[in-house]
Image (cartoon, rainbow, N blue to C red):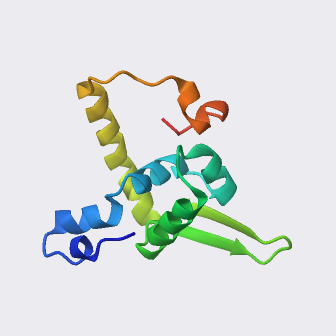
Amino acid sequence: MKDDRFCNSNCPFTRAIGTIGNKWKPIIINVLGTRTMRFGQLDAIVPHISRKVLSEQLKELEEDGLLERLAYKELPPRVDYKLSEKGLAFLPILENIKEWNLKYEVATIPKETDYKWSKLPQDGLS
């Protein structure tokens, strides 16, 4: 759920954190990367997220212009998600965060089996 106190702040940094500042949104953006994915694929890859929360986060990312939802008029209905130009512009920032974490992390790295995505192709997920 969005915190309007952050999104309506006078500070640009606080507003940015209001847009992308929970634990799920950066993970979803990172998983999507430059690909187009369906809800079920995202659900299978994003670790420890409920389908309800994933759905809420996707809606908020779309409302904030970071994500495009592509609905096809087919039977059965099909919906794809991809990053918008604004979302793609956030990817280098995520890369910088990952580099910073690798440089300064002190915690042990969990085994691959701790994550849903360990059984899926690793292209673009790290």
Q: Quadrant of residue 78?
A: bottom right
Q: Quadrant of residue 72?
A: bottom right
Q: Nearer the viewer, residue 91 or 48?
A: 48
x%, y% of residue 123? 58, 36
Which residue is rendered at x = 86% and y = 73% of the image?
75
Residue 119 falls left or right of residue 92: right
Q: Residue furthest right?
A: 75
Image quadrant holding the N terminus, namely bottom left
Does residue 83 appear anywhere in the picture? no
Which one is nearer the viewer's eye here, 38 or 51?
51
**Which residue is painted at 68% across and 55% down in the image?**
40
103 lies above or below 16: above
Q: Please give left or right for residue 97 compared with residue 40 in the image.
A: left
Where 28 falls versus 120 (above or below)? below
Q: Where residue 71 sits in the image (x, y, percent)?
A: 68, 74
Identify which residue is drawn at 40% across, 50% down.
Answer: 91
Count of marks placed on residues: 0
Is residue 1 left or right of 36 when viewed as pictured?
Answer: left
Residue plotted at (23% across, 27% down):
104
Q: Is residue 73 above or below residue 48?
A: below
Answer above or below: position of 6 versus 123.
below
Q: Position of residue 61 (x, y in %)?
A: 45, 67
The answer to whether one can see residue 51 in this image is yes
Tell which residue pokes out farthest to the left in this image.
Answer: 10
Q: Position of residue 94 (x, y in %)?
A: 35, 46
